[in-house]
Structure formats: structure tokens, C-alpha cells
Image (spheres, rainbow, N blue to C red):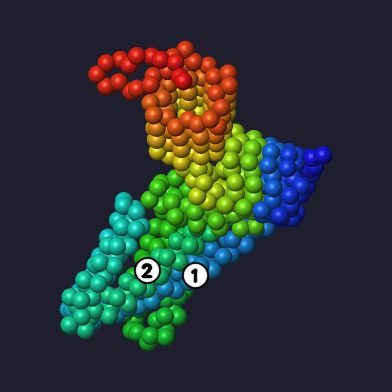
Amino acid sequence: MTLDFSGQNLRGRSFKGRKDLVGANFSYADIRGADFTNALLVEANFSQTQAGREPGWAIILLGISLLLSALSGLASAFVGVITGTALTRQDPIHVLAGVVVLITLAVFITVSIRQGLVIAIGVLVAVGVTAAAALGAAGAGSVVISALTAAAVAIAIAMVASAAGAGAGAGSAVVVAGAAAAASGMSVAIDSSGTTAEVGSVSAAVAVAVAMAAAGLSASVSWKALAGEKKYMFLRRLTNSFAAIGGSNFRGADLTDADFTQATLESTNFRRANLTRTCWFQAKKLSFACVGRTYLENEQVRQLVVIGEGEKQNFDNLSLRGINLRGANLVEASFVGADLSDANLQSANLSRAKLMQAHLDGADLTGAHLAGAWIEDWGITSETKFDKVQYEYVFKRLGKKRRPRPEPPQ
């Protein structure tokens, strides 16, 4: 007999490791903060459930982000002291070192936005080492290394702070906090260094500029990551990991054939979960769930499983193993070389779809429409289900010069 939790308030409840939840009914339940770690939830019904964080966790995450912003601002303050001191010295070499620091940071921010953080970090290291070596003989190399190291620390902490702030829904607060922390941190840094008023004003300006740049860059990059830009994917994982703290936890759970139709899944942890044929139709806020390295990591795929609309879209060479596309509109979609093993394609409309070299071991195409589909070298096995497949003709080869001859599938 399956268990029935439908409509119940299950906030914070622990189902960790339970093996008696096969086919359990959680529909319309409030499972915010519930722990399903390593639970056996095959064919469980989570339709219309409210998942995510319990009330109060957003405040905790905001507090963490503001604390990290303060640390980032303090690091920015030291950048200001080092660079400001160099810029106000009479020695042209030290002035040049200060200018090099500012130019390098400007280039780093520009490259980060246009090319991604990995390339930008490479540029920062290359320029820093080269400048330090060139100015080392004059005794100003340490200025460049110290300032850029402090700036790198400030930006790194600001990135983490922004991820935590985005997870708490307060990313803009991080930018303001970073600037405020830099301004307050300046007084501590200047007092401890004993600098003059002239140096202090220059240092303060540099520190606030660095803090604003670090906080602004981190906020911009984190929101671009949430929008699905591939070059910021690692930050997206970080942001969603923060957002999932205190949320519903399905880490390591077996969700094979589970149903999340119209469930609200913000701040829910699905890392290392078995999502084979899991149904996500019309699920809400799935983009803000922590999905690890599953097929849900791809923004295009995530939209596909939620709305079931993939007409004329390109999914070539993607790993879609175990995806649930039951009843989806995939007319003229391209799955060349894609892994569709164990996928649920029941009643899917694959008319004129390109399935060349697609892997379909264990896939279920019961009732699927394959009229005009291209099936050259597709990877079907004895485990592929073709019951009641609807087709008039398929193309075994993708012709280049002449229209291919239509043939029935074998």
C-alpha cells in the first residue's frame, strides 16, 4: 500500500534514506525544507507541491552575503592604500606601478564581461607577472603584486557574496554593501598605515572604485549565470547551491518516473539524484533549483521539459539520457548524435526530426509520431520500444544532392 501525504504540511520533515516511499503521494503538500536525501521515490507524485526554503533562511543567506561583502570591501580598502600610496609618491616608477594596477583591473573587468572569468584570470596573471618583472628592478614590482593579489581576493569574495545574495533574492544589496564596506574599511586601513590626507583621499577613491567594480562585476556575472550563459556556468552552480541551503533536499534520491507537474521548485537540491524519466511539465522556478550536472543544467533543455515545446530546435550531441519528453512537440527538431537512452518519448511528435546517430537504447517511443524522421545510423536496440509508433515513411539517409528515397523503419 502506497503512502499518502497529499495536502499535508511537511515543512522540515525528514524522509532521509527511507525506502518505503515508492509511489507515495505528496501532491499539493508543503515540503519546504523537507529532507529526502537518498530516499527511494520511484513513481512518487509531487505534482502541485510547494518545495524550497522554509521562511527565515533568506534572512540567513542575506546575512552571509553582507558579511562576505564586508570582507570584500576590506580587501578593496587595502588595494586603495597600496595603489593610492604608489600614485602619490614622487618616484615615477611607483606612479607607473599604480597606473599599471588600475589599467590591469580595468582590462580584467572588460575581459570578464566579454570573454568570461577563466580568460580574464589568465590575463590578470599574465599582466601582473609581466609588470612585476619589468618593475621589479626598480623596487616597484611588489606594489603591483600586492595590489593585484588584494584585488583578486576582493573580487573572488564579492563573487561568492553575490552568489549568496542572489540566492537570497537580494543581489543589489551586495553591491551597496560592498561600497559601504570599502568606505568604512578605508578608515581602518588608513589609520593603521598612518598615511597623509593626500594619500588617504586618493586611496579612498581607489578603494571605493575597486569595491564598486568588484561588487558590480560579481552581481552582473551572477545574474548572467542565472540566465544560462555557458561561460559563467560554474557561478550558476555556486549561486544555486547557496539558494538551496535550507531548501527541500533530494540529494542522491531515486526519482525515477517521479512526477513534479506544476510543482514550485525554487531553492530545491537535486544534486546526484536519479532523474530518469522524471516529469517536470509546467514546473515553476526550476531555473532556481540546484540540479548539479544533470540534463537540467542546460537552459534550453530545462525549458523543453517544462513546456514540452522543441519544434525546430537543435539538441545535437547533448546528453539527454533519461529525459521525459512525453507528448512533446519535437517537429523538425535535431537530435544528431544526442544520447536519448532510457528517455520517455511516448506520444512525442518527432515528425521530420533528425535522429541520425542518436542513442536510443532503452528509449520508449510508444505512440510516437515518426513521419519523415531521419534515422540514419540511429542507435536502437532490443530494449527500444516502438509499440504503436505512427509513421508513413522515414528517411534512412540525409541526402545532399537528391531527395532521399523514403523507406519504412526496420
Is 54 left or right of 391, judged from the image as shown? right
User: Callout 2: 10 Å neighbours few (<14), some, many (20+)?
Assistant: many
User: Callout 1: 10 Å neighbours few (<14), some, many (20+)?
Assistant: many
Describe the element under mark 1 as helix, strand or loop.
helix
Q: Residue at x 47, y 12 (%)?
A: 392
Is 112 left or right of 100, judged from the image as shown? right
Report the residue that reaches farthest toward the right.
1
Q: Residue 94's spot in the image, x, y percent?
A: 22, 79
Amino acid type for the residue under numbered disc 1: Ala
Describe the element under mark 2 as helix, strand or loop.
helix
Q: Residue at x 55, y 56 (%)?
A: 241
Q: Using the image, determine if residue 44 lies above or below residue 154.
A: above
- Label ID, residue 200: none
- Label ID, residue 152: 2
Q: Residue 110's spot in the image, x, y percent?
A: 30, 56
Of badges 1 and 2, nearer the viewer stands 2
Label 1: which residue? 70
Q: Using the image, determine if residue 284 lies above or below residue 192.
A: above
* Sequence-earlier tag: 1 or 2: 1
Q: Residue 218's spot in the image, x, y percent?
A: 42, 58
